[in-house]
Amino acid sequence: MPSANPTTSFIYSHEQSQHVLSPTHPMRPIRLMHMHELMCSVGLLDSESIATESPRLATDDEIAKFHDSDYIEVVKAIDAGAIVPAMHQFGFGPGDNPPRPGMFRHATLAAGGVMLAAERVLNGQTKNAFVPAGGMHHHAMSDRASGFGIFNDAVIAIKHLIDQGLRVFYVDIDVHHGDGVQAGLYDTERAMTVSIHESGQWLFPGTGNPDETGTGDGDGYSVNIPLAPYTDDELWHQAFDAVVPDLARAFDADLIFTQLGIDTHRNDPLAHLSLTTQGHNLAVQKFARLAEELNIPWISVGGGGYDMTAVARAWTMDLATMADQALPDEIPDTYTSLSNMPTFRDQGEYRIDPDIRFEISNHNQLAINAIRNQIFPKFGL
């Protein structure tokens, strides 16, 4: 049983791992079951620091904080098995967002889980919260599905937090640009969105350039760090460290909200960055230090991640970091959900030609320089 004063809410249900988008779809929710079983095998969820709770369903009014009513009704209709001739206009069809029974419930469970996380930290019940089924919908737009996403749980929750008078500092470390979150918050100064991702020159959704800085009141509050393919741990953190901590301090946030996609991993089949699980988790450690330094709550959601072993290990490491719990170096023999996974940290050195690495560094530095020239002066940096 959790203690009376846990520090971390962990919001997840087995149901969230059991649906299938299509037989060949790269997004396999079963990855969450493998993650949960790993957390259990190391005793992480027995910690008194962690309160485990099932998500609730988001209400229609909550979803409508971002999404158009016509779009919400189309999702309901497809879910119920209706024939919707124009569904492609709403982003559904063969490929990324196949129509399927149960999708309305699964998307509202993800959004409701993030709303529940917001409630827990707003009420002071926990210092932080992790919702691994959230974040996957960060490409969803107000009027259409996109990039595996249906209801953009991050935007829905952040708009709710803004309605409560909070300023939200959002950082998306998924390999893909967080275009849906950027679009949903592009015109407000109450949220700063930072996305560090593989450049749209090479990867979906083709956006996320440094000159996408916001509009109207939100001008200067949208920050994009596009990275070159094969960026490794060291080069990724050079970019992160050059931008994120200074902006977090200058923005004067009331809450940190992070999307922890692990499709940056060197074995991920859908992208081209070269991070390890420990490189990914180092970013989460830095978020923990920032939340502590700024003395503000912190919500994390999951995101992309298509290598099963990377997802299970990284998000177990991330929850442990959020709850300030230690993990063993080796994965216990009792864990049998996935094979060929001896340690939490990736082993073996990543090697790349020095000339290519030099070009990667130069590409990344151009993005950093653009942000320092376009964004930093607005905040006195």
Image: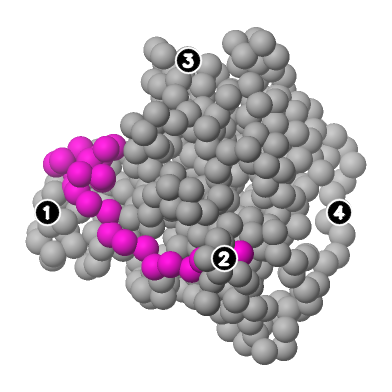
Q: Is residue 226 above or below residue 203?
A: above
Q: Which residue has dot 3 on it?
A: 219
Give the alpha-carbon distance from disc 2 to disc 4, as whole Å: 38 Å
Q: For the point 66% across and 11% down, which residue is it? A: 380
Q: Is residue 297 magenta?
A: no
| 10 Å crowding of disc 4: few (<14), some (14-19), many (20+) | few
Give the alpha-carbon distance from disc 4 to disc 3, as whole Å: 40 Å
Q: Which residues are magenta?
A: 49-72
Q: Which residue has dot 1 on it?
A: 84
Give the alpha-carbon distance from disc 2 to disc 1, as whole Å: 43 Å
Q: Which residue has dot 4 on it?
A: 351
Q: Is residue 56 magenta?
A: yes
Label 1 is placed on what type of residue? Val
Cβ–Cβ under 8 Å for marks 2 and 1: no
Identify the mark nearer the N-term, 2 or 4. 2
Label 4 is placed on what type of residue? Arg
Identify the mark nearer the N-term, 4 or 3. 3
- Nearer to us of marks 4 and 3 is 3
- Nearer to us of marks 2 and 4 is 2
Q: Nearer the viewer, residue 34 or 235?
A: 34
| Image x and y of residue 366, in percent | 72, 23
| 10 Å crowding of disc 1: few (<14), some (14-19), many (20+) | some
Relative side of 229 to 10, left or right: right
Q: For the point 69% across and 59% down, which residue is it? A: 324
Relative side of 35 to 17, left or right: right
Q: For the point 83% across and 56% down, which residue is it? A: 350
Residue 310 location, quadrant: bottom right
